[in-house]
Amino acid sequence: MEFGIVGLELSGKTTLFSLLTGHEPAAGHGKPGTQVGIAQVPDPRLDRLSALFAPRKHTPATVRFVDVPGIVKGGSASLNVPELRTMDGLAVVVRGFPSDAIPHPEGSLGPARDLELVETELLLNDLAVAGNRLERLGRDLAKRKAPELEAERDALERCRVALEAGTPLRRIGLSAEERRLLKGFTFLTAKPMLVILNAGEEEAGDLGGATARAGLDGLAAQPGVAVSAVSATIEQEIARMAPEDQSAFLADLGLPDRALDRLLRAAYALLGLISFFTAGEDECRAWSIAAGTTAVKAAGVIHSDFERGFIRAEVVPWEELLDAGSFAACRPRGSLRLEGKEYVVRDGDVITFRFNV
């Protein structure tokens, strides 16, 4: 899973990037540049499986984050980052913290306004991409008629109409065929969007209320949009503490959990992802897949040979494996099942794939 982090200048998005990935932010506010980092997905289920098997390797799922330069109103050059277009989703950081030392670029706090400004830059960026391609298509179709090009033109025209009306492409209900035709354009407003309110320290104990006060709580009803909140500066300080001290400080502040846990849960839900596990003495590992993935396709996530030579999947829910204490002990209980190619993998399944190539 990959997310691009975008937002207006001085929104605290680079602090958030540091909080998620452990990378220290570059010195100086608004310093240009693109940063890439990896966050390991915390999963207590994987931790408990590793405690059972004591494997040589413990491998959590990971999320790759790309932090691009802050957006300046009317100048979306920071969005012209090739890596940003390959992301699975966008994390849009909007500022909710006051600071005399770091004045807001717009002169006052306004998270809903800031989100609209970011969305406008995304729309303009996509509109330029669609317009350029439509111009080329017009020239090509004047020379020769081609059904595939005409279908692409029609899909792009629909996108252009929506973009000119200020409607993100994630909201227009693109058909499967339209998504196929438009896949190569990697439109930014077609990507799922996780809106993250970067709240002030005084609101850390009531982040749910902070999103409502910021006028963002209604966004979650929109297709392809999720909303979460952090207080990045104070939560970064907590993240630097020893693990045994973090829980006490989170409780003192009224925070329900760590920002990393909170945001990654929201990201997984937004993209419709689940996790399955492989477990043994060599390695315990978490794998991220889309909900609804079949066993044979899940095998292919591990290695193409697993999918090509798939024979069967041996499946046990993680809780039942822990309760039994071993795969062997699961068999007489009937909790270890043999499943075929079309089995739909469930969140928390521990799977051993049998294959022959």
Image (cartoon, helix red, strand yellow):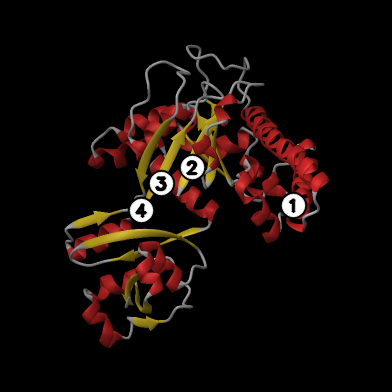
**Residue type at tag 1:** Leu
* Left or right: 123 as drawn, with respect to 47: right
Q: Does residue 291 appear in the picture of this structure? A: yes
Query: In the drawing, what numbered circle is on residue 3?
Result: 2
Image spot of residue 276 (x, y percent): 38, 64
Badge 2 element: strand
Front tag of 1 and 4: 1
Badge 1 element: helix
Q: Is residue 338 above or below residue 192?
A: below
Q: Which of marks 2 and 4 is nearer the N terminus?
A: 2
**Residue type at tag 3:** Val
Number of numbered discs on residues: 4
Q: Does residue 162 appear in the picture of this structure? A: no
Rounded to the nearest angstrom, the CA distance separating label 1 from label 4 is 40 Å
Q: How crowded is mark 1: few (under 14 residues within 10 Å), some or many (20 or more)?
A: some
Q: Residues within 10 Å of mark 4 (few under 14, many from 20)?
A: some
Q: Which of marks 1 and 4 is nearer the N terminus?
A: 4
Residue picked out by circle 3: 63
Residue picked out by circle 1: 149
Residue extending farthest to the top is: 101
Q: Earlier in the sequence, mark 3 or mark 2?
A: 2
Badge 3 element: strand
**Cβ–Cβ below 8 Å for labels 1 and 2?**
no
**Cβ–Cβ below 8 Å for labels 4 and 3?**
yes
At 49% across and 68% down in the image, what residue appears?
293
Q: Is residue 226 above or below residue 164?
A: below
Rounded to the nearest angstrom, the CA distance separating label 2 from label 4 is 14 Å
